Image (cartoon, grey):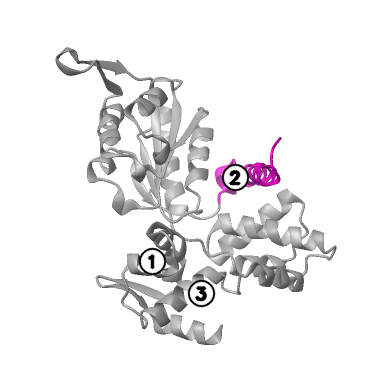
């Protein structure tokens, strides 16, 4: 029997899929990226070819996975999804590539987590559509070249700096950066999601949620669902006041910062006298993983101008200090 957390996770997964745009016009923001990808796909369709491989990079939750889905929908192609951490051995990659249907869009999330050995195996697959398999060991080992069905690779990463230059160069269709969203874009996304979920959300409620969404659609949709749940449990209409109460319960302030964000800023201020502080030292003081510090906490704090990254480490800015005094 499934546990309650499993059921809730499954329910959220279904809701997330329902909220994912299936048309380019429904995908808000990232206008420059959309325009380039649409040209790439249309040109390939006119030639009757598979489009060249593309790479998306940017902070979590800004639409990289959704773009992969839209690429597959546009090409009317099957979509195969995996992640860099799931491909541990050469055999894992070989199994994925050799079992692709012709014309498949292969989406590898967090592609920077591929090992160097796996990357080298991927190079000929991307350049010439072939895969070199070594059979046997020692003097009797031999290499067999397998011809792969035509496919398009869509890579995604939150850690562009960790992606090797040779792998980046294989994305002939382009390397595209996805950025944070504007408040107007978030309001449009929240209004669309509220309509799909049957939530009666006034412009004032939408504004409250947008301002707390960390400039990220994934956060906006998650917060919309949580506020909706709070309203239903307390059997009260979803007003701006109810939204504020819910966010206070969740520990989310008017800027979208959580207690963990504030703990990061306080640690930098009190533990390191405002910095500079290295990310590993900060992570150790907070009992967190350095990757969590860099990928979860810092991107939005950098966007707000509350911290700076220097060659010597992280520094708490005057804006960050003022925020802590007011909070």
Residue 122 sits inside the magenta stretch:
no
Residue visible at 46% across and 20% down in the picture: 101
Residue visible at 14% across and 15% down in the picture: 139
Label 3 near label 1: C-beta < 8 Å?
Answer: no
Where on the picture, by quarter, is residue 89?
top left
Give residue 21's mark: 2
Q: Quadrant of the N terminus?
A: top right
Q: Mark 2 falls on what kind of element?
A: loop
Where residue 225 appears, as percent x and y from the top left, is: 69, 56
The range drawn in magenta is: 1-27
Task: Give the alpha-carbon distance from disc 1 to disc 2, as whole Å.
Answer: 39 Å
Where on the picture, by quarter, is residue 205?
bottom right
Where residue 293 appears, as percent x and y from the top left, is: 42, 63
> Seen in the image, is 58 located left or right of residue 17?
left
Residue 2 sits inside the magenta stretch:
yes
Nearer mark to the viewer, of 1 and 2: 1
Residue visible at 48% across and 37% down in the picture: 71
Residue assigned mark 1: 284
Q: Earlier in the sequence, mark 1 or mark 3?
A: 3
Residue assigned mark 3: 262
Q: Nearer the viewer, residue 106 or 30?
A: 106
Q: Mark 1 falls on what kind of element?
A: helix
Label 2 near label 3: C-beta < 8 Å?
Answer: no
> Seen in the image, is 127 located left or right of residue 305?
left
> Seen in the image, is 60 located left or right of residue 132?
right
Label 2 near label 1: C-beta < 8 Å?
Answer: no
Q: Nearer the viewer, residue 19 or 116?
A: 116
Q: Earlier in the sequence, mark 3 or mark 2?
A: 2
Give residue 27's mark: none
């Amino acid at each position: 029997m499934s546990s309650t957390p499993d059921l809730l996770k499954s329910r959220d997964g279904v809701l997330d899929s329902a909220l994912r745009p299936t048309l380019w016009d429904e995908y808000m923001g990232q206008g420059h990226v959309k325009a380039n990808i649409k040209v790439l796909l249309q040109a390939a369709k006119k030639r009757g070819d598979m489009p060249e491989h593309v790479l998306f990079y940017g902070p979590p939750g800004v639409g990289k996975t959704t773009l992969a889905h839209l690429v597959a929908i546009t090409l009317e192609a099957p979509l195969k999804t995996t992640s860099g951490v799931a491909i541990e051995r050469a055999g894992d990659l070989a199994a994925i590539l050799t079992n692709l249907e012709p014309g498949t869009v292969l989406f590898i999330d967090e592609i920077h987590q591929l090992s160097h050995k796996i990357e080298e195996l991927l190079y000929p697959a991307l350049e010439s559509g072939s895969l070199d398999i070594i059979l046997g060991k020692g003097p009797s080992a031999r290499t067999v070249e397998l011809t792969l069905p035509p496919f398009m690779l869509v890579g995604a990463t939150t850690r562009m700096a960790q992606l090797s230059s040779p792998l980046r160069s294989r994305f002939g269709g382009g390397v595209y950066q996805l950025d944070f969203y504007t408040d107007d874009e978030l309001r449009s996304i929240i209004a669309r999601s509220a309509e799909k979920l049957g939530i009666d959300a006034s412009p004032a409620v939408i504004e409250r949620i947008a301002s707390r969404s960390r400039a990220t659609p994934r956060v906006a949709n998650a917060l919309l669902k949580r506020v909706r749940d709070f309203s239903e449990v307390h059997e009260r209409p979803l007003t701006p006041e109810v939204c504020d109460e819910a966010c206070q319960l969740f520990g989310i302030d008017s800027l979208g910062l959580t207690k963990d964000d504030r703990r990061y800023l306080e640690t930098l201020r009190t533990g390191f006298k405002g910095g500079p502080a290295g990310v590993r030292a900060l992570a150790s003081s907070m009992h967190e993983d350095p990757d969590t510090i860099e990928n979860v906490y810092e991107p939005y704090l950098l966007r707000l101008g509350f911290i700076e990254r220097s060659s010597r480490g992280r520094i708490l800015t005057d804006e960050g200090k003022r925020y802590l005094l007011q909070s």
